[in-house]
């Protein structure tokens, strides 16, 4: 059983759905599909180059969030493997399986439709290149080891230390659109009881990319050495990182 593709799903309350999906369409220079799903709750962002790997989902209640779809040739076998590794099935709406990881992160196992080409970075008028290329799983200290073991076991991707002691990332296969980063949230996040997730972009000029996102309606949350955290106009936090948008690595070392 192999994972063939990964998709990040941006979950928005109904009143924020149009705002959130339009923002990410502009951020990634993508087109957008027509509505899909039983309640027309999904749209897919369509990159100019490569296969889609980002969707937006309209929620009928709840707060904004982000979750992962893993695409497999054998959905039941992949879901069973996830259960064996400690995940919990919370629904089977038809054609895919909804689960929670041991740390509580919602994710889905779904089929593979032949996606294989990771989109190339986009070049912007400010001279920078950028690409959404990573899902960061934000994990409380108490379940960090177990969560890392779960995602390593489910994907089979090798683990590597990140640029900081609280980071581990999984080395994705060639062509896979999203790398997985597992981030241990120490103080002041020690009270976190359930894993969450956010998107990361790789960019070769973080200040220029940050200014572009702010012009599109994002708000600045914090700036640190290797990344800048922003909040999109619909309330989701994400990061622009100082990683090479082609290799996913920092100029001098691997990591966030």
Image (spheres, grey):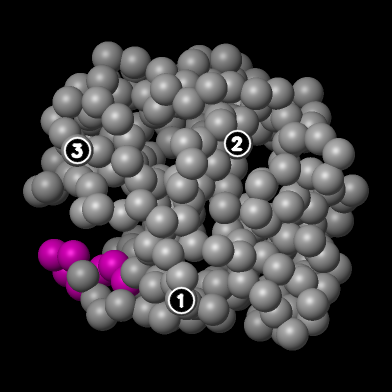
Q: State the residue position of label 2.
A: 181
Q: As drawn, which residue projects farthest toward the left?
A: 94
Kindly report the distance in space between the C-alpha atoms of the residues bearing marks 2 and 1. Answer: 26 Å
Quick check: marks 2 and 1 in contact, CB under 8 Å?
A: no
209 over 186 or under it: above or below: below
Task: Decide which of tag 2 and tag 1 comes sooner along the chain.
Answer: 1
Q: State the residue position of label 3.
A: 73
Side of 91 where 103 appears, left or right: right
Residue depth check, mark 2 versus mark 3: number of the one nearer the observer = 3
Could you say where residue 47 lies in the image, as x and y percent from the top left? 45, 72
Task: Decide which of tag 2 and tag 3 comes sooner along the chain.
Answer: 3
Q: Quadrant of the N terminus?
A: top left
Task: Decide which of tag 3 and tag 1 comes sooner along the chain.
Answer: 1
Could you say where residue 6 lies in the image, as x and y percent from the top left? 39, 46
Q: State the residue position of label 1.
A: 48
Magenta extent: 37-43
Side of 133 where 183 appears, left or right: right
- Name the residue located 24 percent from the left edge and 76 percent from the top edge: 35
């Amino acid at each position: 059983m192999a994972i063939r593709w990964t998709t990040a799903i941006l979950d928005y309350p109904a009143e924020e759905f149009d705002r959130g999906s339009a923002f990410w369409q502009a951020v990634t220079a993508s087109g957008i599909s027509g509505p899909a799903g039983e309640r027309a709750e999904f749209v897919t962002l369509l990159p100019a180059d490569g296969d889609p790997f980002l969707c937006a989902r309209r929620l009928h209640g709840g707060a904004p969030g982000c979750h992962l779809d893993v695409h497999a040739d054998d959905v039941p076998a992949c879901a069973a493997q996830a259960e064996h590794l400690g995940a919990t099935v919370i629904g089977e709406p038809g054609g895919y399986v909804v689960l929670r990881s041991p740390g509580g992160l919602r994710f889905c196992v779904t089929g593979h439709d032949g996606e294989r080409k990771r989109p190339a970075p986009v070049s912007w008028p400010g001279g920078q290149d950028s690409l959404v290329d990573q899902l960061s799983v934000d994990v409380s200290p108490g379940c960090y080891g177990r969560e890392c073991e779960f995602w390593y076991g489910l994907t089979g991707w090798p683990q590597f230390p990140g640029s900081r002691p609280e980071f581990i990332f999984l080395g994705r296969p060639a062509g896979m659109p999203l790398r997985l980063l597992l981030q241990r949230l120490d103080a002041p996040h020690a009270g976190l009881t359930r894993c969450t997730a956010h998107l990361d972009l790789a960019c070769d000029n973080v200040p220029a990319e940050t200014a572009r996102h702010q012009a599109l309606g994002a708000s600045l949350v914090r700036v640190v050495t290797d990344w800048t955290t922003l909040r999109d106009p619909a309330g989701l936090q994400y990061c622009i990182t100082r990683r090479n948008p082609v290799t996913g690595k920092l100029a001098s070392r691997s990591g966030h």
